[in-house]
Image: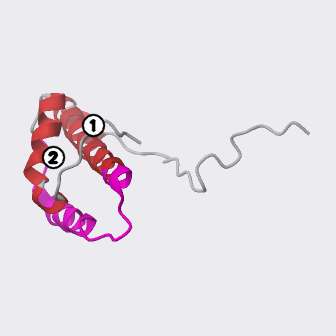
Amino acid sequence: MDLSYDPPSAFRHAGDRLHALVAAEIDSDDFGPGDYLPGLDAYLHAMDYDPRFHAEGRRAAWGRIVCALRGRAHAYRAMRENPGFAGHDVVSPVVITGVPRTGTTPSTA
């Protein structure tokens, strides 16, 4: 959880700020197709209306959104820099399910 970003006073108006922040951080404004924008806008609007959202929660939520958009931009950069990536078959994908950290601590018994 990244708490280093100051959240906006109103999330619903922060889409441009979010994109500008991430673009400046990674020196790229390629976020891929805009099909994610309606969902992002709905999510940002909804975040302004959560009655249990306290100051630290707003900061944490903003950090997560920044991180998610940064990940998208990195993915599109990697795809652009490696144009043959789609030519490789995925033979056996790894799917991990379960609660995070389940079974990661060895038993001492």
Q: Nearer the viewer, mark 2 or mark 1?
A: 2
Q: Would you identify the image quadrant in which residue 109 lies? A: top right
Please, which residue is most extreme toward the right here?
109
For the rendered model, the colour scheme is secondary structure
Residue 93 versus residue 10 in the image, above or below:
above
Tag on residue 73? none
Q: Along the polypeptide, which appears first: circle 2 or circle 1?
A: 2
Residue 62 versus residue 87 in the image, above or below:
below
Q: Amino acid at mark 1?
A: Phe
- The boundaries of the magenta stretch are 30-58
CA gap between label 2 and label 1 equals 28 Å
Q: Secondary structure at mark 1?
A: helix
Q: Residue at x 17, y 38 (%)?
A: 22
Please, which residue is most extreme toward the front here?
55
Q: Residue 76 at x, y = what percent?
A: 20, 40
Tag on residue 85? 1
Query: Circle 2 sits on which residue?
Result: 18
